[in-house]
Amino acid sequence: MKVLKFGGTSMANAASISKVAEIINSDDRARFIVVSAPGKREPGDIKVTDLLYECIEARDREGVCDAALEKIIRRFDEIIKGLDIKLDLTPEFNVIRDQINGGAGRDYASSRGEFLSGIVAAKLLNARFVDAGDIIRFDMEGNFDSETTNRLVGQRLVGSDRVVIPGFYGKMPNGKVKTFSRGGSDVTGAIIARGVGAEIYENWTDVDGFMTVDPRIQEDPQIIEMLTYKELRELSYMGANVLHPESIFPVRKADIAINIRNTFNPSAPGTMIVPTKKYMSGQYTRTDRTITGIAGKTDFAAIYVEKSLMNSELGFARRLLKILERHNILLEHLPSGIDTMTVVIDAANLCPEDINAVLREINEELSPNNVEYVEGIALIAVVGHGMNRKKGTASRVFGALGDADVNIRMIDQGSSELNIIIGVENGDYKKAIRAIYAEFNK
Ligand code: ADP
Ligand code: ASP
Ligand code: MG
């Protein structure tokens, strides 16, 4: 029995939802269906989730969300008409309007896209609708509560006929709705797969599989036939947003493989994401590849600290990291030399006051010879288990970047030899990715 998750593009309009129904109805093992909110119908369109965030902004600005909500009502009307089903969402929209106008928060509002999408899909498929709020649990701090959830999923779903579950959200013990971060319906699908003990978790999207590199950067990249949980984690965390970086944790607990598939080309086999140990021990056919994929993100910042004899100063790294912790700053990477240490942080959510305070405290508490702060850094990860069996991979990466005239600002190689992380300037980001791709696809 399978869990199938359909993303925003698959749920975007009546035509795509009809394809979703065909896929489900032609597969006897398609038992548990997780759906996203309707996404973009064409480039430039607005996802229902974003329209719901706009409802909150309209409410805060004008006192009510009615006009903003109208756009969402129209989108669902169009879907229901196109699918030719008998369904009236007026009562649901009345509740949503009252809740938002009465002060409900962003998590509640944004979760309603998946909620409504789930009701539509259940009606179309003649399946039971189970609200994610009844089975996906968060604690009072808003952290996902995996074990309570797993128990509830087992109790409510195991042994059921076909069920539709909305993705992206759950509830806290006080009944408040809480969502995962953006793209979180992937996580819901993985949680359901673990909870019901699925044979496979199929994640249906709008591309033929996980590609060696983001298709929006490199035209027509290769599809990766198979990758491991570990490779997926590295690539998705570093920006390959075809799958949410946290979707790996639930399935990993139960050794369930993920199959990325294309709703718009269902005959393509897609990408299999398999348990690392089984792959490494030869239980699957391994392709002889040096690197598996390349991913990256822009807008990081680096704090570069230099101090002679840093290596013999007990607790230096701990004191440096303590300063960041005090300011609630998450660390992304920590490349170091004998007398230098670089702290790479995500600059998107930082305010200048925090950075100034951090730099001042580093000077006061660590007495370094030099501290520099650099913004506008892009990180690129080159990932693959094959790298530790092939000599010279790093030099090929650096050679390709040198030939493309890309200035390397930072290098960090994980001890597992599963990845090489390179920091370049934001402006060189795409050029660098294309250069590395070209080097390994000659
Ligand atoms: P869904 O709405 O189905 O969840 P997403 O938009 O979240 O789909 O993810 C699919 C998109 O991820 C693709 O359309 C593609 O543009 C993008 N993407 C980024 N990196 C990759 C990659 N390495 N392989 C495939 N797609 C990628
Ligand atoms: N609808 C949510 C988002 O746009 C969750 C998802 O699609 O996975 O982020
Ligand atoms: Mg997604």
Image (tube, rainbow, N blue to C red):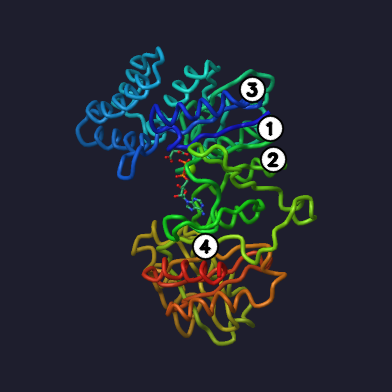
On the image, numbered disc 2 is attached to which residue? 256
Residue 62 placement (x, y as % from top left): 19, 33
Q: For the residues labelled 1 and 2, say whether their Cβ atoms are less than 8 Å apart.
A: yes
| C-alpha span from label 1 to label 2 | 7 Å
| Residue 425 figure quarter | bottom left
Decide which of 343, 315 is in the foreground and name it: 343
- What is the three-letter code of the residue carrying label 4? Leu
Image quadrant assignment for residue 49: top left
The 10 Å Cα crowd at callout 3, few under 14, some 14 to 19, many 20 or more, is some
Mark 2 vs mark 4, foreground winner is 2
**Earlier-in-chain disc, 3 versus 4:** 3
**Residue 10 seen by the camera:** yes
Q: Nearer the viewer, mark 2 or mark 3?
A: 2
> Quick check: 27 left or right of 214?
right
Q: Residue at 46% across / 76% down in the picture?
A: 409
Q: Which residue is mark 1?
A: 198
Question: What residue is at 69 percent from the left and 76 percent from the top?
Answer: 391
